[in-house]
């Protein structure tokens, strides 16, 4: 995981979520990875969803982390446009 991914994962793991949501399970799993095995590589989809969920739950997360996630999402979108995905 990169430093921005770790920051977002840790921030997400402290959010409150509606019961029985995929978001909650994913955030908790990514938080455990960020703390327990930060050297682990994430898939492109995991990377994308960490940043998407950080923006979705932005009211519960520090503004600097949300700003970081928005920037990373733009980078991912621009890379997808360049590759035609």
Image (cartoon, grey):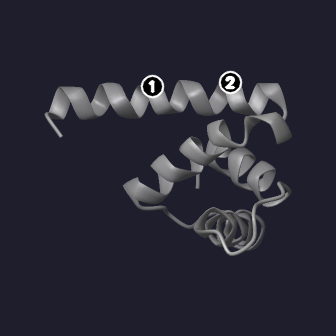
Q: Position of residue 28 (x, y in %)?
A: 72, 69
Residue nearest the observer in this picture, 17 or 36: 17
Q: Quadrant of the N terminus?
A: bottom right
Which numbered disc flags the more N-terminal residue, 2 or 1?
2
> Is residue 85 placed above or below 39 in the rendered structure?
above
> Is residue 76 placed above or below 42 in the rendered structure?
above
Question: In the image as oriented, which residue stretches furthest toward the front?
Answer: 19
Q: Position of residue 19 (x, y in %)?
A: 75, 71
Residue 67, labelled with which disc? Answer: 2
Q: Is residue 55 visible?
A: yes
Q: Is residue 46 left or right of residue 37?
A: left
Label 1 sits on a secondary structure element that is helix
Residue nearest the observer in this picture, 16 or 69: 16
Residue at 74% in and 72% down: 32
Q: Quadrant of the C terminus?
A: top left
- Badge 2 local density, few (<14 within 10 Å), some, or many (20+)? some
Q: Position of residue 77 (x, y in %)?
A: 35, 30
Q: Is residue 22 left or right of residue 18?
A: left
Residue with the mark numbered 1: 74
Give the alpha-carbon distance from disc 2 to disc 1, as whole Å: 11 Å
Locate residue 27: give its quadrant.
bottom right
Residue at 22% in and 27% down: 81
Residue nearest the observer in this picture, 1 or 25: 25
- Badge 1 local density, few (<14 within 10 Å), some, or many (20+)? few
Label 2 sits on a secondary structure element that is helix
């Amino acid at each position: 995981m990169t430093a921005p991914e770790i920051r977002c994962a840790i921030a997400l793991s402290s959010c409150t979520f509606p019961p029985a949501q995929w978001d909650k399970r994913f955030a908790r799993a990514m938080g455990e990875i960020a703390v327990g095995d930060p050297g682990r590589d994430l898939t492109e989809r995991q990377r994308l969803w960490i940043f998407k969920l950080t923006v979705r739950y932005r009211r519960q997360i520090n503004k600097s982390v949300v700003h970081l996630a928005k920037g990373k999402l733009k980078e991912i979108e621009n890379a997808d446009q360049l590759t035609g995905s």
